[in-house]
Amino acid sequence: MNKPVLLVVDDDPQVLAAVRRDLRSRYRDRYAVLSAASGEEALATVKELKSRGESLALVLSDQRMPGMPGTEVLARSRETYPLARRVLLTAYSDIDAAVRAINEAHLDHYLSKPWDPPEERLFPVIDDLLDAWQAEYLPEAKGLRLVGHQWSPRSHAVKEFLASNLVPYRWIDVERAPDARALLDAAGVGAEGLPALLFEDGSVLRNPEPREVAERLGRSLSAAYDVYDLVIVGAGPAGLAAAVYGASEGLRTLLLDRHAPGGQAGTSSRIENYLGFPAGVSGSELTRRALTQAQRLGAEFLAPLEVTALSFDGGYKRLTVANSREIVTKTLLAATGMSYREHPAAGMAERTGAGVYYGTATTEAPAFSGRRVLVVGGGNSAGQAAMHLARYAKEVHIVVRRESLRETMSQYLIDQIGKTPNIRLRPLTELDRVDGQARVECVSLRSCDDGTCAVEEADAVFVFIGTRPRSEWLPPEVLRDAKGFVLTGRELVAAEAYPRVWKERREPLPLESSVPGVFAAGDVRAGAMNRVAAAVGEGSMMVWLAHQYLALT
Ligand SMILES: Cc1cc2nc3c(=O)[nH]c(=O)nc-3n(C[C@H](O)[C@H](O)[C@H](O)COP(=O)(O)OP(=O)(O)OC[C@H]3O[C@@H](n4cnc5c(N)ncnc54)[C@H](O)[C@@H]3O)c2cc1C
């Protein structure tokens, strides 16, 4: 296979030559740099690359070209190469239009001309985009392959595990892929061994649990030290931020997650409002960057590892961890966030993982190409999922009990949904039941107006309602509110039980719970903002507070 391609598109021969020259000077060893003088020529090149089985890593196109504008070239090349990074080249006067185009066409970046010096203005951007592409890209004949049934909950669990732990793999649906049976025969896997994970060295894991996959991938599941300065439970945005600051400030820091890094934010297809990412950033990309940063600074990360209980021994906190030895720490951050409650409609529990999915649409969306799917919920997470699914599914129906999305969803998402022809809002409607043989085939929807029910075909239901804090692993000494959110700082002082439980001479620090040295940050904390930036802010701030606590002990 040839080198992956960087494609440059511009109708101005001088600009085209200059970009090509700069890109070749830096990337020639690893990438082939091709150029096209018009949108039409670029799309013909893209088609030809596909037919030859080549990889396209990045398209960089000028916006103003006669015939076809750059935004259209980038949007259409995405249909053939969904992973390729897309950069728009604009004149300074076109920046407003470029920002609009970023929102509408979901571009990765815009560059304004001129880009001198390239070491400052061109290469850092392209380096970042190519790193992100490399992290997702898997050459056709290489790497991990997962072969299984689309409607198997275990297949879904392994897919989720690999995707959220940022492990590139290729999914092969045993019923649809022509070469699946031959692959399984060659690996000696029968029906009972599905899903099967096939490794490059020829070895196979049959019907594995995520934990077995982690072990086979060489992930360590045991802590390196006996005692830590800071243990962070939960690797969502709050936990990741605490790990970055804890490690960078010299604390012996351990980060644990029951599933994978990223938390709820990691499941988001596009976070549009996080500072510093004008084109938005996918949850997996933000997670990849944050985890790399935390580990580079010296934080230890273990997953999948669930903390099931916590006890206290003098100033030390002892964590009970599923299938592993106890972990001891001087300070602890509970950053376990929230998760979605099970939807009570009949038929949902039996089909979870087989057409019913909670809190994520990114892993399964491609499997629903050309199909009809439902999104239940009216918050931003539901809106983002609907937008993501609309790129694949024939129809996406958003089912909400309210009259409209106005009170529950950000306006930018409402606008995007309004402009997406294959998304239909179903207001004043609730999901009554799902049916189908071993998977979702149809749903019954009830009108909140008159209570009548109607049965409709549907291939999947993505649920984004009813969150609950993940605080069940904390002991009763850590006070929570009636809904289970951890009380900290001022909210703790205002609680009725405060005088009974708090025995220190000082007041609790901000973010400190009713047990000295146990902090909470992010969505699991009472009064949280439920935003990525807020969770990151609290996680970062907690490290400064941990220093204060350690200085007191
Ligand atoms: C689909 C979606 C889209 C979103 N989009 C946006 C957006 O665009 N902008 C925005 O600002 N916000 C957005 N949000 C909200 C944002 O993601 C959350 O506010 C944020 O992730 C909260 O971070 P956190 O670190 O507190 O917790 P979480 O992200 O919930 O992470 C908690 C982590 O703790 C782990 N955990 C739980 N229990 C245990 C245990 N016992 N042991 C070990 N680990 C455990 C979980 O596996 C999880 O990884 C979105 C949320 C969703 C679901």
Image (spheres, rainbow, N blue to C red):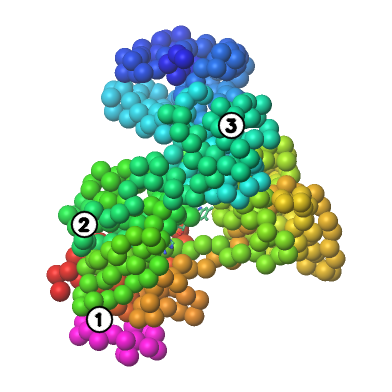
Residue under the image location 42 percent in, 78 percent down: 480
Q: How crowded is mark 1: few (under 14 residues within 10 Å), some or many (20 or more)?
A: some
Q: With respect to residue 403, does 365 lie above or below?
A: above
Q: Residue 329 location, x and y as percent?
A: 24, 66
Q: Which amino acid does label 2 sit on?
A: Tyr
From the image, state whether disc 2 or disc 1 is nearer to you. 2
Q: Which residues are drawn in magenta?
A: 491-506
Q: Residue 168 location, x and y as percent?
A: 46, 35
Q: Which residue is identified by label 1?
A: 507
Among numbered discs 1 and 3, the one appearing first in the sequence: 3
In the picture provided, is 184 more to the left or to the right than 286? right
Q: How crowded is mark 2: few (under 14 residues within 10 Å), some or many (20 or more)?
A: few
Among numbered discs 2 and 3, the one appearing first in the sequence: 3
CA separation, marks 2 and 3? 42 Å
Quarter location, residue 123: top left
Quarter location, residue 491: bottom left
Q: Residue 374 location, x and y as percent?
A: 70, 51
Q: Is residue 498 magenta?
A: yes
Rendered image: mark on residue 184: 3
